[in-house]
Image: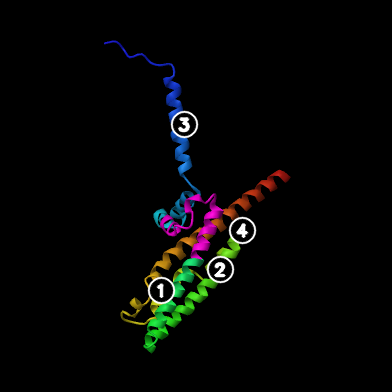
Amino acid sequence: MAAAATSPMLPALLLLIAFAAATTGAAETSALDHTCAMLGEYYYVEPELCKSVLCADPSEPCHATRDQAAVAMLAARLAVRNATATKGLVEAALAAHAGNATVAKGIESCVQLYAGVVAILQRAAQFVAAGRYREAGQVLNANPPIVVPDRCDGAMGAGDAAALLPRENDAFAYMALVAHSIINNMKSFYFAKYMDTFHRMMKTED
């Protein structure tokens, strides 16, 4: 049986296909993918959780973020929005249970906790917007937003009273975890870049 003739264009065509596949794969790795992968490596936050939290709002173009700084700003903005919305839902629960003094007292404590965390996240978001990741991380490390849901549950006392809080209270813990981790990662990333630049300058002077 005669061997099939090989076109002189075939090697070039295969090379073109391989190049296209490689560049397509690179394009699919967005800043969001890279940031969430880093959280999985250094902060024990599953990349899937990171992406689901940051992409939960369809109005936010999560995969269109151009770099890590944009992802950090997205996380900070979503954390403020999420905390504010959850505070509103807790306030609605307070109004619904105003007739029960014991329950109302617990829910009111939760409202105060969310009022505090909204202010903290707003301050952190201002630092992130200014590229001041160190200060943003300090604000969050001093008052970790992730503790708020548990403290709200604790304020409700023993038994099933915590079930009277909106389910968004528990969900906020995931938003807080992802946003806090991303901002701390940016703080570490930029500190490392600063130290690298510093060492390069010292070597140049030598």
- Crowd tier of the residue under label 4, counting other residues whose Cα lies within 10 Å: few below 14, some 14–19, many 20 or above: some
Residue 132 in view (yes/no): no
Earlier residue among tags 4 and 1: 4
Label 3's element? helix
Q: Amino acid at mark 3?
A: Phe
Residue on which the image places disc 3 = 19
Label 2's element? helix
Label 4's element? loop
Earlier residue among tags 3 and 4: 3
Earlier residue among tags 1 and 2: 2
Residue on which the image places disc 1 = 150
Mark 3 near mark 2, Cβ–Cβ under 8 Å? no
Residue drawn at 48 percent across, 77 percent down = 113
Q: Is residue 202 left or right of residue 23?
A: right
Question: Which portion, as a residue range, is magenta?
Answer: 51-79
Distance from Cα at disc 4 to Cα at disc 2: 14 Å
Q: Position of residue 41 (x, y in %)?
A: 44, 52
Q: Is residue 163 left or right of residue 173?
A: left
Distance from Cα at disc 1 to Cα at disc 2: 21 Å
Please state, as top left, top right, bottom left or bottom right, where the N terminus lies in the image.
Answer: top left
- Please tell me whether mark 1 or mark 3 is closer to you in this view: 3
Residue on which the image places disc 4 = 131
> Residue 122's mark?
2
Residue 170 in view (yes/no): yes
Q: Is residue 178 above or below residue 5?
A: below
- Along the line of sight, which residue is nearer the eye, 128 or 197? 128
Q: Position of residue 60 (x, y in %)?
A: 48, 57
Distance from Cα at disc 3 to Cα at disc 4: 36 Å
Taking the view exactly as shown, the residue that stands out farthest to the left is 1
